[in-house]
Amino acid sequence: MKKQKGLTLISWLAIIAVVLFNAIIAMNVVPVYLNDHSVKTLMQNLETDSAIKSATPKKMKDIITKRLRINNIYSIKKENITIKKSKAGYLVTIEYEPRGKLVGSLDYIVSFKHEATIPVR
């Protein structure tokens, strides 16, 4: 009898099942992290933005929300944005939890929190 080389059909099916499950997870979760990268970049740009430095907290929320909409990020509402006065200026915090379906009754929840300090003029 010759020695067997390679995998059996059952082994191949098991490997394909694991790869498909990971691909499904990646297709659902990777866009969430791409959106978060846009939020992170927006928060970093706030610290050096001259247009937002002279704005009131309400106007700051409007500017941030408008920029989120420009980047097609609709999961963050105005309620997720908090602005507090601090010694260095305003502390802007965006805290949100995107949720979604993976497969069947399996869901995901991812928590994000970003902060930026905006100096006052």
Image (cartoon, rainbow, N blue to C red):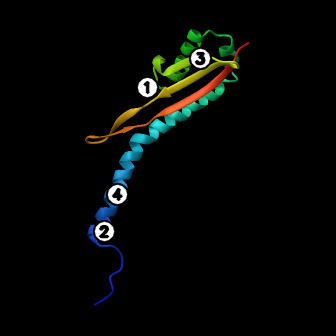
Name the kind of residue labelled 2 in the image. Answer: Ser
Marks 2/1: CA distance?
41 Å
Q: Are marks 2 and 1 in contact (CB under 8 Å)?
A: no
Q: Position of residue 62 (x, y in %)?
A: 54, 13
Q: Is residue 31 visible?
A: yes
Q: Position of residue 91 (x, y in %)?
A: 62, 21
What label sits on residue 67 in the rendered view? none
* Crowding near the residue tagged with mark 3, few <14, some 14–19, many ≥20 C-alpha atoms within 10 Å: few
Name the kind of residue labelled 4 in the image. Answer: Val
- Which label's residue is closer to the chain start, 2 or 4? 2
Nearest the camera: 7 or 120?
A: 120
Marks 4/1: CA distance?
30 Å
How many marks the image carries: the answer is 4
Q: Position of residue 92 (x, y in %)?
A: 59, 21
Q: Are marks 3 and 2 in contact (CB under 8 Å)?
A: no
Residue at disc 3, secondary structure: strand
Which residue is under mark 4? Answer: 18
Quarter of the image with the C terminus in it:
top right
Residue beneath the point at 56% across and 10% down? 58
Quarter of the image with the N terminus in it:
bottom left
Residue at disc 2, secondary structure: helix
Compared with 29, 72 (above or below) is above
- Which label's residue is closer to the chain start, 1 or 3? 1
Which residue is under mark 2? Answer: 11
Name the kind of residue labelled 3 in the image. Answer: Lys
Which residue is under mark 1? Answer: 75
- Which label's residue is closer to the chain start, 4 or 1? 4
Which residue is under mark 3? Answer: 84
Quarter-of-image position of residue 108: top left
* Crowding near the residue tagged with mark 1, few <14, some 14–19, many ≥20 C-alpha atoms within 10 Å: some
* Crowding near the residue tagged with mark 4, few <14, some 14–19, many ≥20 C-alpha atoms within 10 Å: few
